[in-house]
Structure formats: structure tokens, C-alpha cells
Image (cartoon, rainbow, N blue to C red):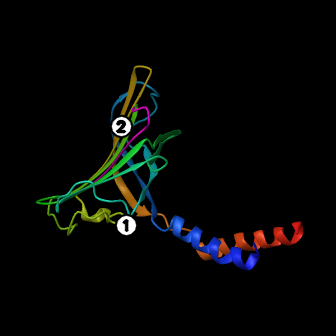
Amino acid sequence: MRATTILPVFFALALSANASIVTVLFSGNITQVPVDEIFGDIHFGDPFQGTYTFDSTAPDLIPSPSTGSYSFTAPLGITATIGSHIFEAAGSLNIGILNGFIDQYTVLAFSPTGDLAIQLFLQDNSAAVFSGDQLPSHPPSLSAFTQRDFQLTFSLDGSELQAAGQLEVLTAVPEPHSLSLMFAAVLAVYRIRRIVF
């Protein structure tokens, strides 16, 4: 296959493969630590941060005009860091949308073994955020919600960690410029082909 044939095929595959995956960055501060039997060093006021990743083209699993449920499997999920501790829940991820007398946006993930659960929960009591139950391709603005909760539950060898916090940042991570990356990759392939052949 000639390099002139590889070029458009490579561009098309790379762009279509990454078009619907969205990565969202979140951060905030811990407001409650009801139980920390595992580490003993997670406290009120500690910062937390993390990301969750989903496919914005996922179908709605609930046939209702006011309730949306969108499910994903690994590797899509949530990763969170509190202090020096990293938690990854990528066994199952669900994003729920409620558009009714209140508006809610819920992101919930579990680890494959079920010993870790991470949840982000947003609620607007004025019901002014959503106009339907469609999955937003980007996260809604935090300023529109009065309730902005982060919750993490982790169990290990019979011990448990429970931590809750207040979300301060929720924003989509900008993707690298696809065309410039693809051009660099194709140029590298072309140079290798010239050396080998």
C-alpha cells in the first residue's frame, strides 16, 4: 500500500475513533470523612480531583421523556485522587439525567470487584438546567446547581473508607488538535516506509 493511500485512511480512522469520547475533569474539597479505617490520613478540607470518561453517543436505556440513563463499561469510568491515594472505578459507569420538578445530573461508577464506588451528584431545585433527558456532550455548568456533591466509598479487607466533598470544578478536557497529531503520525509512517523500502 502506498503512502498516498495510507494518508486518508489513517486520518479517517483516527478522527472517527475519537469523535464521541469525552473526558471531564472535576475537583473540590472534602467536607466529611465519616469513616477512614483504611488510611487514616484523609481529612476535612483535603483537596480531591479526578476525571470521568464517557461516550456522548450512548443510547438512553430508559424510555421516558424526563429520565435518562446512560451506561458504559471499562475502560470508561471515574478516577479520583485524594491526597496520595488514587481510586479507579472502571467496572461500570452510569450517567443519569432527571428533567422534572427538579433537575439532576448523576455520575456513578463501581470498580469491577464492587469494593469501590465513586459518585458525582448535581441537583437544581428550580429545574432550569435541562430541557430534556438527553445526555449532554459536555458537563453542565456547576453554577446552575445548588447541590454539588462528591462521594467515595471504599472497602478493603473488612475496613472501610467513606468520604464526601463539594465539587468546585467540572469541565470537559480539551482534546489535542487531531489534525496536527495525525499529520505527525502519518509523516513518521511515511519516513519509516522510505527507510525500510
Q: At 17% from the left edge and 63% from the top edge, which residue is drawn?
A: 65
Q: Which residues are magenta?
A: 106-114
| Three-letter amino acid code at the position of disc 1 | Ser
Tag shown at residue 35: none
Q: Pointer 2: what residue?
A: 163
Front position in the image: 87 or 93: 93
Q: Is residue 93 left or right of residue 147?
A: right
Q: Pointer 1: what residue?
A: 137
Q: Residues within 10 Å of mark 2 (few under 14, many from 20)?
A: many
Residue that protrudes farthest toward the top in the picture: 158
Residue 83 at least partly seen: yes
Q: Is residue 17 magenta?
A: no
Q: Is residue 118 above or below residue 141?
A: above
Instruction: Point out the image quarter for the N terminus.
Output: bottom right
Could you give the CA–CA distance between mark 2 and mark 1, rounded to whole angstroms? 28 Å
Q: At 43% from the left edge and 35% from the top edge, which residue is drawn?
A: 42
| Three-letter amino acid code at the position of disc 2 | Ala
Q: Is residue 170 left or right of residue 193?
A: left
Front position in the image: 169 or 69: 69
- Residue 91 placement (x, y as % from top left): 43, 41
